[in-house]
Image (tube, helix red, strand yellow):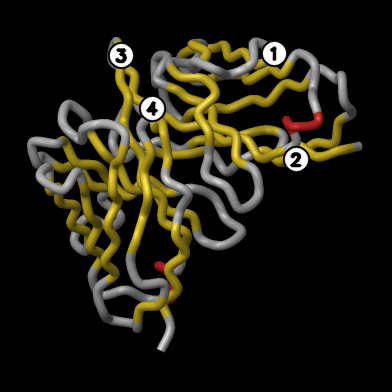
Amino acid sequence: QVQLQESGPGLVKPSEILSLTCTVSGGSISGFHWSWIRQPPGQGLEWIGYIHYSGSTTYNPSLNSRVTISVDTSKNQFSLKLSSVTAADTAVYFCARVGYSSGSEWFDPWGQGTLVTVSS
Amino acid sequence: AIQMTQSPSSLSASVGDRVTITCRASQDIRNDLGWYQQKPGKAPKLLIYAASSLQSGVPSRFSGSGSGTEFTLTISSLQPEDFATYYCLQDYLYPFTFGPGTKVDIK
């Protein structure tokens, strides 16, 4: 079955760029949308955005000016870049596949998540 | 953005209890709602999509209902492995938004 794994630095300095990669195994990245979601420690979930394997993207306006999601189909990976980070961006970052049917969309499966701390 | 609320924010229940969690949307979202279960230190797990469709592999004691602005997740007979936090998610309009969560713990 399809599995997702996030990777990237666990510590980022304020004002710098947070960069994460999600590697998809057990299936092709083609044919689907792929998403990033985050969860600050002890808090709820926030949808960051998603990318179609063709490269088209949709972002959460609350992060729109700072976020870039890209895809590399040759490596079966997609990536997140978040610029000008502050302590408020400290969170566990999850990647997930988007499923859809009859107009409904959902996230399944998910990666295990990776904690990124923003601190000097 | 569409605001999602959940009630209660937490509840205590016993094994075998019937549990109902409510999710409300700030506007009509048709049936574009999913439910997720999250255990501490783990990723959320999809339970229900399109308001009432049970994800493959999810036990039949979980069910979802509702449309428009009010939705419910019901666990017909709570099992020990069901103690977790439950989130609803609207996928009707961007940005997709989650409810604040309902924590279900042991009475």
In the rendered structure, find residue B61 and report the number of the disc placed on it: 1
Q: Is residue A30 above or below residue B28?
A: below
- Callout 2–callout 3 Cβ contact below 8 Å: no
> Which residue: 68% across, 26% down?
B21
Estimate the spatial distance between the alpha carbons at disc 4 and disc 2, rounded to whole Å: 24 Å
Label 2: element kind: strand
Q: Single out the residue that lies furthest toward the bottom.
A: A120
Amino acid type at image mark 4: Trp
- Callout 1–callout 2 Cβ contact below 8 Å: no
Estimate the spatial distance between the alpha carbons at disc 4 and disc 3, rounded to whole Å: 9 Å
On the image, the x and y values in percent for residue A5 come to 37, 50
Q: Nearer the viewer, residue A47 or B28?
A: A47
Considering only order in the chain, which callout, 3 or 4, is on the residue closer to the N terminus? 3
Question: On the image, numbered disc 2 is attached to which residue?
Answer: B10
Residue at mark 4 shares a chain with residue at mark 3: yes
Q: Nearer the viewer, residue B1 or A1?
A: A1
Considering only order in the chain, which callout, 2 or 1, is on the residue closer to the N terminus? 2
Q: Is residue A111 left or right of residue B57?
A: left
Q: Is residue B20 left or right of residue A53?
A: right
Q: Nearer the viewer, residue B78 or A66?
A: B78
> Which residue: 41% across, 31% down?
A108
Question: On the image, numbered disc 4 is attached to which residue?
Answer: A106
For label 2, the crowd category at 10 Å Cα-Cα, with few meaning under 14, some 14 to 19 and many 20 or more, is some
Q: Is residue A98 left or right of residue B70?
A: left
On the image, the x and y values in percent for residue B83 come to 75, 36
Amino acid type at image mark 2: Ser
For label 3, the crowd category at 10 Å Cα-Cα, with few meaning under 14, some 14 to 19 and many 20 or more, is few
Question: On the image, numbered disc 3 is attached to which residue?
Answer: A101
